[in-house]
Amino acid sequence: MRRLLAVSIAALSLSACQTVQNQAGAPTTYQDPATLGAVKGVGIESQDIVSMTDQMMRDMLTEPRLANAATAPNVIVDSEYFINESASRINRNSITDRLRVSLQRASQGRMNFVARHNANMVAAERELKRKGVTDQGKNALAAAQRGGDYRLGGRITSLDARDPKTGMMSRYTQIIFEMTDLETADIVWSGIYEFSKAAADDIIYR
Amino acid sequence: MGGTTLRLAGCVALAAMTAACQTVREQENTAVKPEVVHTYLAGKPKSLEKHFYVSLIQGPRNQVLNDMRLGLASMELGDDKLAESLLDDALGRIESIYVDNPDAAKARELFTKELVKDFKGEPYERAMAYYYRGLLYLKAGDYDNARASFKGGFIQDSFADEDQNQADFGLMQYLQGWASRCRGNNTTAADDFAEFKKIKPDFPLPADGDNTLLLVETGQPPVKFSAAAQGETKEKFLKYRRASGTEVARLSYSEEKTETQGKGKSAKTVTTSVSHKVEPQLLEDVFYQASTRGGRPFDAVLAGKAQFQDAASTVGDVALTGAMVAASVAASNNHNNQGEAAAVAGALLLVGLLAKGAAEAAEPDADTRYWDNLPDRVHAASLKLPERVTSLSVDFLAADGTYLRTREAKVTRAGACGIAWVRGDSAQPANPRAPYSTSKEAMVSPVVIPGLPAPAPERAEPVKRGPEQAETEQPKS
């Protein structure tokens, strides 16, 4: 009986001790940005940016005024007029940069891209050349930086909903792109990308 | 076996079980190599080195908590880049959805404390993390992401169980409007302010021409504690108490205005000083936001644990009482019943101890870790400030008007708008450890940053001998 009692007490003591081990780290792995990542939320993630910019690029190349004009138009693609009104914190450059790079590679000279985001850099170099601080380089001097014919604008918006009873949270995200004629304000091309995500956190966090 | 032995055995078992409930996750990992520690601390503010060391050794369980409190402390010290990275890390962890997380599953178990889970904060704490990240975006002139942060904070408040208190975090709604306004997005700003007015109809909106937002934070944060339901003794619900009294703020500043008086040759330029007195109004009561969310869904889990604890304890009491009675029969002079009574006493003792042990091992206490350098209240005023005003003197007063102290609020301008942020009380946490972030014993132990090991003494290089020297030292035959 005494042995039984001792064993019981020891077993109880051990069962009361919850051993939640500290977790080991995870080694770095490369992930495909076009697929769902290891860390998931309801905001804009890498696979959304890859999918969205690919779709917009393909769509833009079907617009004759942009991709099939007699003279390649000057296009500005940057985040200056790309507004984020959603609940997702995001670096807007990650969208417009990928779009510009993809477009430039795919258009193969059908569009001319103006680096307005580098205007200060260009202005500084032009000034050095004209003051004679540097030589003129091998390209001919231009009268001025190139003006844009079209510029990208857009807006990210979201609609959030949450059910406090189930903890389910959903976010509908809508991203619109518009290419605007910089003389007439005509919108010569527009595209929309939208998705909705829903998830519920563990009950311990509700 | 006598009654004394039984009692002793019971006490030993209970003591062992209670002592055994220290979880490994609660412990600090002081085995981190000093080289790693010093590399991690490089570039961190000197005054917060112990705090960052604690953050390192407490690991992911308290990462969000430590990120939030150190992010806020770094922001007050003017290290905005560090504050941004800490708050980004905290928000990244808050926004990730925990599905099939083993530690989350453990926290739901009957015999595990809630505080083994990774801390993500209660909704008011998460909202305030978004608030401070939004302020940093405002300071940097990134109004889009500032608005996204405030919107993210506002969404956190929709967790409230009580319908009337869902999504009433007016601070976030007001700041969404302010960020939209600074962005020049007037349509969205109007929508945001209209929503804000539904929450706080009496708070004044920014006037035309206002270009600076002053935010004044007062008081100490809400304190969490584990409370029992009415008429019960088991502590199983998360509750809050206010830790500080009411404070108000006021500021005065003078503005020089230059105007031309007279006409023609008699015209002259006159500079006059116009003084302004402003009393920032209460925009948000953080304690109110903490305490009005209603019950958490997880409280039902804790209540279940407490119910089990009560039932198991009752079963244990009954069995132990039975064991005592049977033991006394076994010890009596009635030799006919002694054997049977001893066996019954043993069995009941075992059942009683098992039940008591299970009751003691159940962990219904709520997780009371909390963000300890938050304010109690946030006051705000929008101002029309000339560019040359770079700081504001803000007086803090007690509720009865007694002067308490004066603090300087630096005006930061990076975009279309300026922002000035000031606290009545320091945001530097006195204790390197957040409340209840580790075991009771560890909480009071001193934080000692391990020193780097002394560099190994340089070994003397063997003297290289030239061929001539070698020749001369050759033994002569």
Image (cartoon, coloured by chain):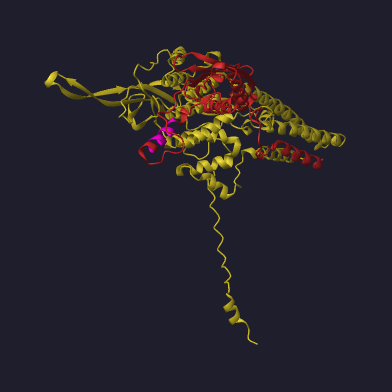
Chain colours: A red, B yellow
Q: Position of residue B312 (x, y in %)?
A: 72, 28
Instruction: State whether residue A159 appears in this view.
Output: no
Instruction: State whether residue A152 appears in this view.
Output: yes
Most common SS among magenta residues: helix
Q: Position of residue B332 (x, y in %)?
A: 81, 36
- Front residue of B260/A181: it is A181
Q: Is residue B323 magenta?
A: no
Q: Is residue A120 magenta?
A: yes
Q: Viewed as shown, does residue A158 lie left or right of B342?
A: left
Range drawn in magenta: A119-128
- Front residue of A95/B303: it is A95
> Residue sitting at 69 percent across and 36 percent down?
A18
Q: Viewed as shown, does residue B322 lie left or right of B247?
A: right
Q: Position of residue B328 (x, y in %)?
A: 78, 35
**Residue A6 lies in quadrant:** top right
Q: Viewed as shown, does residue B344 lie left or right of A18?
A: right
Q: Position of residue B388 (x, y in %)?
A: 30, 29
* Total numbered labels: 0
> Which of the image's four quarters has the C terminus of chain A?
top right
- Front residue of A55/B439: it is A55
Q: Viewed as shown, does residue B335 lie left or right of B211?
A: right
**Residue B409 lies in quadrant:** top left
> Which of the image's four quarters has the N terminus of chain A?
top right
